[in-house]
């Protein structure tokens, strides 16, 4: 299937009242693992990459694998730059065929975030690529980016930011954080509903790992259409690999060592897809 933009997938999700998983791929083999899981669930999916994970394999290789795998899949797939740190990074992603980019200016003062995000939106829209921005700041460090402590999104500020930038989908902070939670998160759903009532665009939840299922469902009902998941995939991968290494100390074939780790990633992706309600929506 041809690649689709993030907006194409998220507009359908918003209309249908479900969310689509945006799964962070930390290394190349996770790309087919995630897409195969989406195909098995007949779900649209977003493959996403931070600049850090792209740097480890290189733009050409990451984009070639992602595009090849995505276009061979019978489900809609978007390729997204997660937490794009600069205009340059967004342009690199677009040049390499990404169909969706995030510009993350959330740590900057409001006016600066607006001005920089607008530049990315103008350039991306000129070539048919859709854009995610962030207002408020989701705390926690993601692949070396971000800060420990976040601050919640002010609904009125979210409206202004969305109107002034023209972003296609908006990441907001309402109680989630990147990485492992030290205690159970408590989402501010009232805040999220107020944002949804003011912003006429799909909303994005960062820090999707470790949020209890009932809170995930409530967030989707309150307007969340894209849910980012990274940590749970890494954790499942590493746990399975450690167990395989412990159980098979003589094994040296990378394919046999890595197969259970890949299967563990797929199991998490399939479970999330069902939880988010996007199964059968391809
Ligand atoms: P988690 O690592 O908490 O799943 O967050 C992922 C994320 O928000 C990527 O942008």
Image (tube, rainbow, N blue to C red):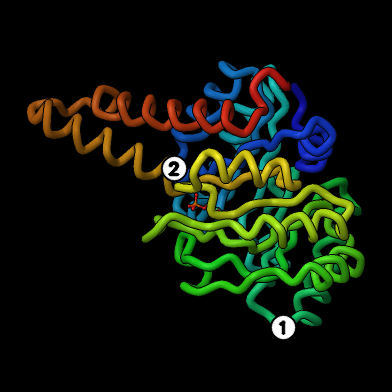
Quadrant where the C terminus sits is top right
Q: CA distance from mark 1 to mark 2?
A: 33 Å
Report the mark closest to the observer, 1 or 2: 1
Residue sticking out furthest to the left: 250
Q: Residues within 10 Å of mark 1 (few under 14, many from 20)?
A: few
| Disc ID at residue 138 | none
Whether 33 is drawn above or below 242: the answer is: above
Query: Hey, which quadrant is residue 144 in on the image?
Result: bottom left
Between 220 and 104, the one nearer to me in the picture? 220
| Residue 105 x %, y % | 69, 71
Quadrant where the N terminus sits is top right
Between 122 and 172, the one nearer to me in the picture? 172
Which residue is labeled 2 in the image? 27
Residue drawn at x 72%, y 41% is 221
| Residue 36 x %, y % | 54, 22
Q: Residues within 10 Å of mark 2 (few under 14, many from 20)?
A: few
Q: Which element carries disc 1, helix, strand or loop? A: loop
Whether 211 is drawn above or below 239: the answer is: below
| Disc ID at residue 109 | 1
Residue drawn at x 25%, y 22% is 256
| Residue 134 x %, y % | 71, 64
Total residue callouts: 2
Between 37 and 52, the one nearer to me in the picture? 37
Whether 48 is drawn above or below 278: the answer is: below
Query: Hey, which quadrant is residue 61 in on the image?
Result: top right
Q: Which element carries disc 2, helix, strand or loop? A: loop
- Which of disc 2 and disc 1 is earlier in sequence? 2
């Amino acid at each position: 299937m041809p690649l689709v933009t993030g907006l194409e997938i998220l507009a359908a999700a918003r209309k249908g009242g479900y969310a689509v998983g945006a799964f962070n791929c930390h290394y190349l083999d996770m790309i087919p693992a995630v897409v195969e899981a989406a195909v098995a669930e007949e779900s649209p999916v977003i493959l996403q990459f931070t600049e850090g994970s792209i740097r480890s394999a290189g733009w050409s290789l990451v984009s070639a694998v992602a595009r090849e795998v995505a276009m061979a899949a019978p489900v809609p797939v978007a390729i997204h730059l997660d937490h794009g740190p600069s205009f340059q990074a967004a342009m690199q992603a677009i040049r390499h065929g990404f169909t969706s980019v995030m510009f993350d200016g959330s740590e900057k003062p409001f006016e600066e975030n607006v001005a920089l995000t607008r530049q990315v939106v103008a350039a991306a829209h000129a070539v048919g690529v859709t854009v995610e921005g962030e207002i408020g700041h989701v705390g926690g460090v993601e692949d070396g980016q971000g800060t420990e402590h976040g601050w919640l999104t002010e609904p009125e500020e979210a409206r202004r930011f969305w109107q002034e930038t023209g972003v296609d989908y908006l990441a907001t902070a309402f109680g989630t954080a990147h990485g492992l939670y030290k205690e159970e998160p408590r989402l501010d759903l009232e805040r999220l509903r107020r944002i949804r009532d003011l912003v006429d665009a799909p909303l994005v939840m960062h820090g999707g790992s470790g949020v209890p299922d009932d809170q995930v469902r409530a967030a989707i009902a309150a307007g969340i259409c894209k849910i980012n998941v990274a940590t749970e995939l890494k954790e499942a991968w590493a746990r399975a690999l450690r167990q395989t290494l412990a159980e098979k100390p003589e094994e040296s074939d990378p394919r046999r060592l890595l197969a259970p780790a890949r299967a563990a990633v797929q199991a998490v992706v399939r479970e999330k897809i069902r939880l988010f309600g996007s199964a059968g929506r391809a």
